Image (tube, rainbow, N blue to C red):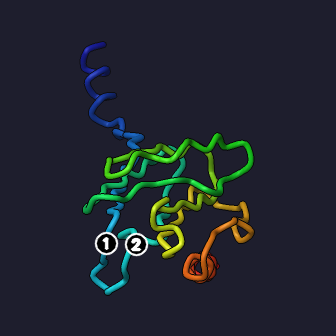
Amino acid sequence: MKNILATAALIFTPAFSAQAADITVDMLNKRDDGAKMVYSQDVVRMDVGDSVTWVPTSKGHNVEIIAAPDGYDIPKKSKLSKDVSITFDTPGVYLYQCTPHKTMGMLGVVVVGDGQNDISGAKVRGKKAQEKLAELMEQLG
């Protein structure tokens, strides 16, 4: 009888799997919409515990987080032309750039969870980068 009850409990217990997502963002010389020196997604929205993997489709790109929530230990920039994956365990908004193409406006944003911190004051160099940051801020609303 115990075996029957145990089996019944297994059958009728819903299976919940807390599986984190892994989102891929390509580092591009040119995107389908004609934009140059960009990431495949300007804004990535995700849950706490999810990861982003950036993949260079051409040589010479990387990822450097330049603004993040308070208390987040910002990692150094990734190596050029290498995949990099970061798991985001702290909710907030993260601004990143491609170091060699930062003045060309190669910026992106990761929004984790509720994304409450303000990145509008992040220091970006170059007119195109400033324009791109303004566009990203509009998308964040």
Q: Quadrant of the C terminus?
A: bottom right
User: What residue does disc 2 label?
Assistant: 38
Cα–Cα gap, marks 2 and 1: 6 Å
In the figure, 63 relative to 42: above or below?
above
In the rendered structure, which amino acid carries the disc numbered 1? Asn
In the figure, 23 relative to 124: above or below?
above
Residue name at image x 33 percent, y 57 percent: 24
Residue 40, given in percent of the width and then of the height, sits at 35, 70
Residue 54, given in percent of the width and then of the height, sits at 36, 54
User: What residue does disc 1 label?
Assistant: 29
User: Is residue 50 shown left or right of residue 34?
Assistant: right
Residue 39, given in percent of the width and then of the height, sits at 39, 68
Residue name at image x 69 percent, y 52 percent: 69
Q: Earlier in the sequence, mark 2 or mark 1?
A: 1
Q: Is residue 65 visible?
A: yes
Neighbour class for label 1 at 10 Å: few (<14), some, many (≥20)?
Answer: many
In the rendered structure, which amino acid carries the disc numbered 2? Val
Quarter occupied by residue 85: top left
Residue 59, given in percent of the width and then of the height, sits at 28, 58
Q: Residue furthest bottom?
A: 34
Pick the residue in front: 39 or 78.
78
Q: Is residue 1 visible?
A: no
